[in-house]
């Protein structure tokens, strides 16, 4: 049975992301873990233990309220509550020490998903650091059955088959087509060999291979999504290389992105 970790700070954005995930997987057997991290923003106070206890009470109270709201919409969802003391990043690391979720789901407050990452948010820190598949849901995104999923790639991502398992499952579940978009042209890649390798990881799935031009890669990806009416964008995060080049903070102001596109981030644990 799948285990999906839902991160919440009790905001409307986090709640929307949780609702998105519950809708997305409502026909599958899934255990959801709804996790809230609470921390102290100061130290040295003689009342620190009292404040910590009060924060713990508020965290648990907030989780119970979120559970009630989620169960109004999805009464049969299996949702366990987890309240943890510490920074979000440390808490998620600790959680992954106890079990490895099939997916982490989190909301994004920025006007666009990437805007929030690039401004040094918790979302970006989680994505840069945590080696688990992550689905980031922009604050206004509403779930709809994904008919087309765009995969932004340098055609060199597919070294280990299990990296793409979450995407493969989603594509099979919704019978979605995968539209691979090659966005880097500075290194030679044997396209035919690369496409054959990629296709071997997605048997029975409708695939297409596409190439976009232009200096602003991010704009190109999202224009391609709009032109093809795609629903989700996927990429593999390497510790160096494609992901960092695509989402370097220096290009933040140049991006014209759309808030309705959720992002599925996969992680290549072989590249450290």
Image (spheres, rainbow, N blue to C red):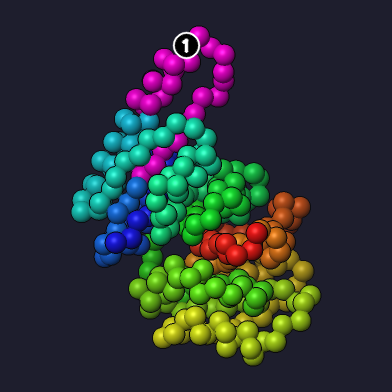
Residue 36 highlighted magenta (yes or no):
yes
SS at mark 1 in the image: loop
Residue 103 vertical position relative to residue 61 in the rendered view, above or below:
below
Q: Position of residue 26 (x, y in %)?
A: 28, 61
Stretch of the chain drawn in magenta: 34-58
The residue labelled by disc 1 is: 47
Q: Position of residue 93 (x, y in %)?
A: 50, 45
* Apparent side of residue 93 relative to residue 159 in the rendered image (left or right): left
Residue 130 highlighted magenta (yes or no):
no
Residue at 61% over, 76% down? 181
Residue 241 vertical position relative to residue 200 in the rendered view, above or below:
above
Return the residue nearer the eye: 151 or 140: 151
Q: Residue furthest left?
A: 76
Residue at 60% over, 65% down? 270
The quadrant in which the C terminus is found is: bottom right
Q: Can I make out residue 261 in this image?
A: no
For residue 239, what is the image quadrant? bottom right
Residue at 70% over, 60% down? 240
Residue at 53% over, 12% down? 45
Question: How busy is the neighbourhood of tag 1: few (under 14 within 10 Å), some, or many (20 plus)?
Answer: few
Q: Position of residue 64 (x, y in %)?
A: 29, 36
């Amino acid at each position: 049975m799948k285990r999906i970790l839902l991160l919440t700070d009790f905001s409307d954005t986090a709640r929307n992301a949780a609702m998105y995930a519950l809708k997305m997987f409502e026909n599958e057997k899934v255990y959801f873990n709804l996790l809230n991290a609470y921390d102290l923003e100061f130290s040295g106070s003689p009342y620190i233990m009292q404040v910590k206890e009060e924060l713990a009470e508020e965290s648990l109270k907030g989780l119970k309220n979120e559970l009630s709201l989620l169960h109004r919409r999805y009464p049969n969802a299996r949702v366990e509550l987890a309240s943890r003391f510490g920074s979000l990043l440390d808490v998620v690391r600790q959680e992954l020490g106890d079990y490895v979720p099939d997916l982490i789901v989190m909301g994004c407050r920025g006007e666009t998903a990437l805007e929030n990452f690039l401004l040094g948010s918790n979302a970006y820190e989680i994505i840069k650091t945590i080696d688990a598949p992550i689905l980031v849901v922009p604050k206004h995104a509403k779930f709809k059955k994904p008919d087309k999923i765009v995969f932004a790639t340098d055609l060199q991502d597919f070294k280990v088959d299990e990296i793409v398992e979450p995407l493969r499952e989603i594509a099979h579940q919704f019978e979605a087509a995968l539209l691979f978009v090659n966005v880097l042209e500075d290194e030679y890649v044997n396209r035919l060999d690369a496409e054959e390798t990629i296709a071997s990881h997605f048997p029975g799935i409708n695939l297409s291979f596409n190439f976009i031009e232009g200096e602003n890669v991010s704009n190109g990806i999202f224009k391609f999504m709009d032109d093809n009416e795609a629903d989700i964008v996927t990429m593999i995060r390497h510790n160096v290389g494609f992901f960092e080049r695509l989402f370097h903070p220096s290009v933040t102001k140049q991006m014209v992105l759309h808030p309705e596109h959720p992002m599925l981030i996969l992680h290549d644990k072989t590249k450290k």
